[in-house]
Image (cartoon, helix red, strand yellow):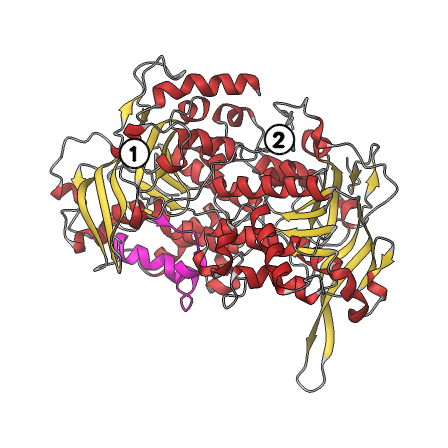
Amino acid sequence: MLPADPERAHRGNSLTLDTLAENDGSTHLLEVRNLATRFATADGYVQAVDGVSFHIDEGEILGLVGESGCGKSVTSLSVMRLIPTPTGEITDGQVLFEGTDLQQISEREMRSVRGGSIGMIFQEPMTSLNPVLTIGRQITEAFEIHLDLKGSAARNRAVEILNRVGFPDPSRRFDDYPHQLSGGQRQRAMIAMAISCNPRLLIADEATTALDVTIQAQILELLQSLCDEFKMALLIITHNLGVVARYAQRVAVMYAGKIIESGTADEIYAAPQHPYTKGLLASVPRLDASARDRLTSIEGEIPDLADLPAGCAFEPRCRWAVDRCRVESPVQVPVRPSQGRGAAGTDHQVACWESENIDAGTDLERQLS
Amino acid sequence: MTTPLAGHDSANSGDGGVDTKTNTTLSVHDLKVHFPLSTGFLIRRQTGAVKAVDGVSFDIAPGETLGLVGESGSGKTTTGRAILQLQRPTSGSVQFRGVELTAISAKEIRPFRSEMQIIFQDPYGSLNPRMNAGQIIGEPLTVHGLAGDKTQRLDRVAELLERVGLNPAMMGRYPHEFSGGQRQRIGIARALAVEPSFIVCDEPVSALDVSIQAQILNLLTELQAEFNISYLFIAHDLSVVRHISDRVAVMYLGKIMELASSADLYENPTHPYTRALMSAVPIPDPVLERQRERIVLDGDIPSPINPPSGCVFRTRCPIATEECAEVVPELIDRGNGHQVACIKV
């Protein structure tokens, strides 16, 4: 099933992206450049996403990690142009998808991208599925819109996809309503909808967070196999550092609206450079760690986005902060090969003024403990 | 598993051996909680039962933490509530310091309520929004007559706030003025107020961000060492449970599948369910992850209304045979207190 035809999709839709493509020099499937999104609140503007840049290539899995309120979901909603207006507003940046800036195209063109070449799955399948339509109807609706496929042809294809995502007894469950399904089955139905039009990119926003671990493993293994088979790119947005370590090739860590560190998964986990990344990794209890070691917690609380410190947003919680951190916001710079264990020529980047000075310290700590 | 979960610092002795103390804080034997299902409008007939907890037995020693892990619907929360008699069990025995709690009335249990406390998952839903922090923490003191006069009570509340890492000056604030982590600290201070010897911690950190989660886990560990409190630590996160527990019980569909010391269970998981559960938990280390065996279970947890015959796990078990449909496996000690309920391993 799912023909892996790169030219595919949008049949019957005269407005294909190819006709609009004014290649903007991006060689990546998706490239986000300097994205900024803010929300108007009673206390003034809240800059939820503040100059975020990242890219994903075909068939690649990128993990976007961070804690609540760091802006990871707003980033994905900005990519899809789903920021609620008028309170929310994308103020800066480009979102280049297959060379086309999604910020520049019309709403009608954007609709053919959503659910067409970019699919998205959310954390809560119950609120994202329409309760008064059957699962089957919700999937075939996408076929009508994006593929011009109707009737029994649409039904057959939907059953095929439901079968593919591990849905039990798909031809019968096709006519079930969302409330008749378990949480894992609903999430599978959501994935079936999202992949039904062979997206080039799938955004999974905390898609498995509410599921039990055995079901989470089923779903993530399925998504990974789709990436391997159809060269689909996957953006995993999660707070779970384990999930990212298992599935992602590259990682971007967000804190208070900014990406503070990015690189390959091996680099980030073996040699984290930013104090926040270090702290996050040290504070997670590990399945393979003996009990009762005191966890190294990050002191303090996640900052209020409406009231951020002047310099680095992590400075109030940072043990290594110096005067410069309090006044000047750090910029992302490549990690020098000598600093981490990463080889030269990788794209390991960190936004910290002091990262070169603190690494020696933590290595010493690790040896001592 | 091909790559055993050998701790990277297994020299740490904290995982604890099997408890050999004869004194137990809590002893649970063959606990069952069945919720009746009935049909009919005027004449109600019982047509079945949801077997939320179906024959659970374990002991907890003073100052010990027993972790209770399982997926949603495994009956772990109901077990905790049945121990505290917040939900009266259908059958079985719950002995707290030698007193059979199932045999006494709600009024007779009241003195024991100051001994047994609970910390809830949802720090938003479990604090009264109309009471300030001081009133929330002070209320159990008044209820159990431990308050003394007003000054004494305020002093005690201030002391408790300080002990859980909050500024006593925050006493007058209301729950909505606190962050999630701070609210959980208030919930802990409230449980601590009556100096309990046993606390049921029901998913106390699962609603918190990882950096905050570590703060709360550290606090719970410190308090246990300081006051010699026993914990029943209920959670779905196996990594968190390993971190905090001396012994761990794995539940599935109302039954315990495996129970062992933390070190034993995680380094030598024996039951096929425990093995699958552990392989499903990713470890934040990409290099290690590439070498790990992944056991992916098919399907969902069956309904507790109509659990499978024989072993309840057999419908998803990779090694089940026909025999598993007939025999209900008993939880048998395989030595060193490592108990497993499986006829195949």
Residue B1 in view: yes
* Residue B232 vertical placement versus A52 (above, below): below
Residue type at mark 2 is Asp
Residue type at mark 1 is Arg
Image mark count: 2
Check residue A293 in the rendering and tell me which mark sits there, or answer none: 2
* Residue B78 vertical placement versus A266 (above, below): below
Residue B283 rendering spot, x and y as whole percentages:
54, 32
Mark pair 2, 1: CA separation: 33 Å
Residue A202 in the magenta stretch? The answer is no
Q: Which residues are magenta?
A: A120-146
Check residue A326 in the rendering and tell me which mark sits there, or answer none: 1
Q: Quadrant of residue B102?
A: bottom right
Residue at 49 percent of width and 41 percent of height? B210
Residue B310 rendering spot, x and y as whole percentages:
77, 51
Q: SS for tag 1?
A: helix
